[in-house]
Image: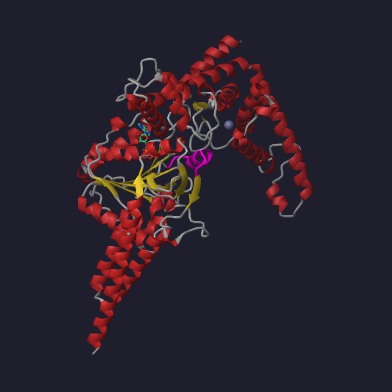
Amino acid sequence: MKLKKKKVILGLFMILFIIAVGSAAYLNIKGKQEIQYLTYNQFLQQINRGNIDTLYLIDDAKLEGKLKNGEKFETDNPRTENFKEMLLKNNVKVEERNQNTTITSLLGIVGFVAIFGGMGIFLSRQSSQQASREISRMSNIDVSEQNQSAITFADVAGNAEAKESVADLVDFLRNPNKYSKYGARIPRGVILYGPPGTGKTLLAKALAGESGVPFYAVSGSDFVQIYAGLGAGRIRSLFKKAREEGKCVIFIDEIDALGKKRDGINGSDEADRTLNALLTEMSGFHDNDGIIVIAATNRLDILDEALLRPGRFDRQIEVGLPDLNARYEILKLHSSSKPLSEDIDLKALAQQTVYFSGARLENMLNEAAILAAKENSPQIELKHIDKAFYTVIAGEEKKDRSSISLMDKKITAYHEAGHALVTKLIAPEYKVSKVTIIPSTRGAGGFSMSIPPDRLYQTKREMICSIKIALAGRAAEQIVFGEDQITTGASNDIERATETLILMLRRFGMNNKAGLINYDVLQKGKTFSIERDILRESKRLMADLYHDTKDILQKNISVLEAFAQELLLKEILNEKEIDRLFKETIETAS
Ligand code: ADP
Ligand code: ZN
């Protein structure tokens, strides 16, 4: 009797299951039949012709949309910045959707889970495990696996430092035993960080290619929208597969989707569980497994510290935007297989593409090639490059190609030159190790200065110097471009200058008016009138220091000019170049 009941229920589930699978498959096929695939370039052509009605923006590898004639299409997600803006400017309707919003597939999956869950209760424990394995296999995360990546370091141009650090790992992957014999701890995880399109994925693939090991790629953002428990399961099965394979490179793009700093408010449980599964798997490696996990992110500072601890992602490598020379190398590499007209000067093109990532440069050359092909032109001409340039920067302010971002570039050059020059002039004992106008992940431009480290205390003079050095960026902007053109680029500088000055007054007793008083102690008695005096005094002092700084720069305006011009030309100056330039120009100036 009991047995019969069980059989009936089981039968019912089977019927339900068949209906669900059948209808899901039917809907799927029906959906698929109506969708045509457009390559990304065909898609762009359709935009140009004004044929696109709507694009459904989801965070997925493929995007769906509707043509004006009602037909549906699918295309690859370029994941470029300003993609939405480009669409909007071309009068394409954009609808943002969450992943899997097509109700049918949602229902289908819910149905699956319910049925498998139901079956699991009735069937033995073993088959329930099988069922959940099925679910995770059917869940829509694809591990794109490219057994034996054909990409090598020859495919990565520029980025010398990052390339070197990654190349270090090749030998680990080839001979993990060699290192474990010496008791050396083999790196398990590496984080590549930097703006999109700078070649992080490319570097990871090249590592696998050079080492002759398989390459597995997943994206962190694929995990966050998934149903409870599946993300962690997916990680476990990924690593299981990797371990069976032996040596390999596992690439996790957009790791920040999993490993954002936990603030307790926005944390998603699913991301947490997935992250924990990842960390557990990584600490389970044996030293001679020869598995290296490479993760990529646009920003290092938002990552959970748990990820960065020793034995996890303890190597962090910056992959920045290419400088002039690197852009030239990338252009050379990607045009090597294209018939370029002789009058195209790649050096000049590199000059004009400041702030372009490698992906953008590649994209631009590809667009130019398509234009040339469409016209049956025997070669890619300058006009094709010109046009492609605009396609690639579509959505940005339209300016003449040679002047695009030139103003930005110029202001940055004078700003950074100001910092460097004032350092050289007022604190010759400081080292200026690098000045650049290429933005880093830390913000626009860059300037690095080191104060002699083997000292216990900072003197009053040094603190004053560092305030003036910080103010020098803004001072240079104002002198050269005028009060109206000063920029937000000085924001961090002003913050640092204020911090230093306030410490001098409130804590270090370095100002006569403020006296030898610690104002933090005083404030416990809430003496606000004193605070007002401090504020007045620091404003006055800061104005004086700014005035001095401007004065210094004005007296050496020809040197500032020379520094800025050199920066505009080379984009990065190292310590030697700075020293040489300073010596030469100061001599001719005096
Ligand atoms: P990321 O992972 O940093 O977003 P990708 O590695 O996906 O960037 O780069 C996308 C494409 O851009 C690459 O496939 C390649 O064609 C081109 N590219 C980017 N950086 C470089 C580079 N340094 N050298 C050569 N090509 C590059
Ligand atoms: Zn600055």
**532 shown above or below 110:** above
Residue 364, quarter of picture: top left
Where does the image place residue 112, in percent across and percent down from the top left? 33, 67
Please identify the quadrant where the N terminus is shown.
bottom left
**263 shown above or below 566:** below
**39 shown above or below 383:** below
Where does the image place residue 264, in percent across and percent down from the top left? 51, 60
**416 shown above or below 7:** above
The magenta region covers 79-92
- Front residue (pair 186, 453): 186
Where does the image place residue 466, in percent across and percent down from the top left? 60, 32
> Which residue of the protein is positioned furthest toward the bottom in this rendering?
1
Label count reads 0
- 54 vs 34, left or right, is right
- 521 vs 353, left or right, is right
> Which residue of the protein is positioned furthest toward the right in this rendering?
529
- 572 vs 233, left or right, is right
Q: Is residue 518 magenta?
A: no
- Front residue (pair 310, 2): 2
The quarter of the picture showing ligand 1: top left
Does the image show residue 120? Answer: no
Residue 336, quarter of picture: top left
Please name the colour scheme applied to the rendered image. secondary structure
Q: Is residue 80 magenta?
A: yes
At 37% from the left and 32% from the top, the residue drawn is 161
Residue 379, quarter of picture: top left
Does the image show residue 277? Answer: yes
